[in-house]
């Protein structure tokens, strides 16, 4: 499915982002690299170095910068601006050189983004964040099945025509029981004809 | 000096080199040109190991021809912290160690074979290998997620990694070379990062060492 402009989508759990790690995911057909700086600020960037297209999620976090694994260009937390090019140590990188930055919201234990999202992300309320469950079916085709699980507040991360990830929180179920129920749901959805 | 008959692109050989480096045991490497040379099928190598598999370790305990037996040998005989109840790398009182090593062998026979198929032309049922690998990786992901949420960073309880982590790691970290994406395994990716940042970690072709100065996750 294509993404709806103006909407927030969940793309990670807050606990997926320990400082020093670069989390990798997909929203629609967009590959994203997501990382937290030392102050806890979250960056959601297109997973592609503007220099040679290598995945930024292969890189490293050094201080409050992400360094690409290929030529070690430094990109700053927040703006995504290239701060330093090791092969040209005496030159200030042009302002146009930057990672493609996506909007960020952190709410109810999830990390959200979208294309020009409006307002705040949907409120899930209090509860323990569930393990994300990838499903080999498109988000459109499974949205209706999610309401069948009481005690859970679920949201979908669409990932192309035949993939999505179920995320959410457990309102009244234990995370283990929720996980078992969601895995059963996943098997049922994937067994059904496309 | 321990002599390791080694092929640099073999995941199982890498497991041995990596554990030896983490423990701090020097190895003398003898290169076996498995691909493209098929030296492991030569008469001289088959005299050493009739199964034609690498790695093979020559030690004072004799010849060890199985990668997990070599991991056990290094962890038990060469880790100074190892005692009767086992040590960091070989917690022998925990039956889950055997379970994880079995799973690592299953991973070798699925993700590992898929990589040999894509990179070295080994003939396998590639769809089946990839499907089996995803099922195994999904289960590792699930267990690691619940462990991590409970504050446990490694496959077995305790605050240090074990041979189980190393045996699973080498196949998990190379799986994308067999067309098996890690996109759906975020906890596995974090655990891979933690292993890469262990003191003494060594890379291999396709596995990056951490950048100097990078934050340890």
Image (spheres, coloured by chain):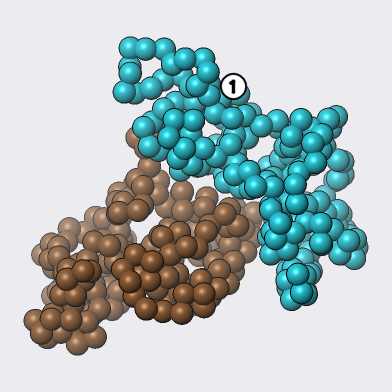
**In-front residue for pair B28/B123:** B123
The subunit letter for the residue under badge 1 reads A
Q: Quadrant of residue A17?
A: top right
- Compared to residue B31, the image places residue B59 above or below, namely below
Look at 52% across and 52% down and name the residue there.
B189
Q: Position of residue B168 (x, y in %)?
A: 44, 66
**Secondary structure beneath label 1:** loop
Q: Is residue B54 left or right of residue B60?
A: right
Q: For mark 1, does the 10 Å Cα neighbourhood hold few (<14), some (14 to 19), or many (20 or more) residues?
A: few
Look at 33% across and 71% down and name the residue there.
B121
Q: Position of residue B54 (x, y in %)?
A: 24, 74
Q: Position of residue B16 (x, y in %)?
A: 28, 65
- Compared to residue B188, the image places residue A48 above or below, namely above
Look at 85% across and 29% down and name the residue there.
A119
Q: Is residue A56 left or right of residue B72?
A: right
Q: Quadrant of residue B142?
A: bottom right
Chain identifier, colour cyan: A
Screen quadrant of the N terminus of chain B: bottom left
Look at 23% across and 69% down and name the residue there.
B35
Give the total of numbered labels.
1
Q: Is residue B23 visible from the viewing direction of this image?
A: no
In the figure, the shade used to draw chain B is brown
**In-front residue for pair A82/B90:** A82
Q: Is residue B126 visible from the viewing direction of this image?
A: yes
Give the residue at mark 1. Answer: A79
Q: Position of residue A147 (x, y in %)?
A: 90, 61
Q: Quadrant of residue B120?
A: bottom left
């Amino acid at each position: 499915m294509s993404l709806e402009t103006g909407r927030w989508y969940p793309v990670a759990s807050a606990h997926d982002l320990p400082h020093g790690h670069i989390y990798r995911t997909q929203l629609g057909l967009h590959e994203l690299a997501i990382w937290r700086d030392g102050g806890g600020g979250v960056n959601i960037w297109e997973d592609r170095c503007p220099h040679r297209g290598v995945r930024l999620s292969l890189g490293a976090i050094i201080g409050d910068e992400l360094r690409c694994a290929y030529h070690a260009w430094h990109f700053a937390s927040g703006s995504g601006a290239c701060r330093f090019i090791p092969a040209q140590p005496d030159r200030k990188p042009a302002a146009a050189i930057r990672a493609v930055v996506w909007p960020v919201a952190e709410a109810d234990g999830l990390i959200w983004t979208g294309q020009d999202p409006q307002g705040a992300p949907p409120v899930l309320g209090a509860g323990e964040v569930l393990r994300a469950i990838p499903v080999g079916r498109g988000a459109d085709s499974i949205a209706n099945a999610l309401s069948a699980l009481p005690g859970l507040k679920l949201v979908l991360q669409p990932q192309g025509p035949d993939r999505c990830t179920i995320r959410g929180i457990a309102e009244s179920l234990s995370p283990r029981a929720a996980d078992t129920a969601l895995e059963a749901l996943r098997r049922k959805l994937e067994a059904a004809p496309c | 000096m321990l002599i390791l008959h080694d092929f640099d692109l073999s995941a199982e050989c890498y497991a041995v080199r990596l554990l030896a480096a983490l423990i701090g045991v020097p190895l003398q490497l003898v290169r076996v040109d498995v691909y493209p040379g098929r030296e492991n099928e030569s008469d001289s190598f088959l005299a050493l190991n009739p199964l034609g598999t690498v790695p093979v370790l020559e030690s004072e305990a004799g010849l060890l021809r199985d990668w997990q037996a070599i991991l056990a040998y290094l962890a038990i005989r060469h880790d100074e912290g190892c005692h009767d109840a086992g040590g960091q790398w070989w917690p022998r009182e925990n039956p889950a160690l055997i379970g994880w090593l079995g799973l690592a062998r299953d991973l070798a026979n699925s993700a590992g074979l898929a990589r040999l198929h894509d990179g070295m032309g080994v003939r396998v049922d590639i769809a089946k290998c990839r499907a089996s690998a995803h099922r195994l990786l999904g289960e590792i992901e699930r267990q690691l997620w619940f462990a991590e949420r409970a504050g446990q960073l490694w496959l077995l309880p305790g605050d240090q990694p074990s041979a189980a982590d190393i045996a699973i790691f080498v196949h998990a970290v190379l799986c994308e070379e067999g067309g098996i994406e890690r996109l759906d395994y975020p906890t596995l990716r974090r655990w891979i990062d933690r292993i890469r940042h262990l003191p003494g970690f060594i890379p291999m072709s396709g596995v990056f060492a951490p950048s100097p100065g990078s934050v340890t996750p």
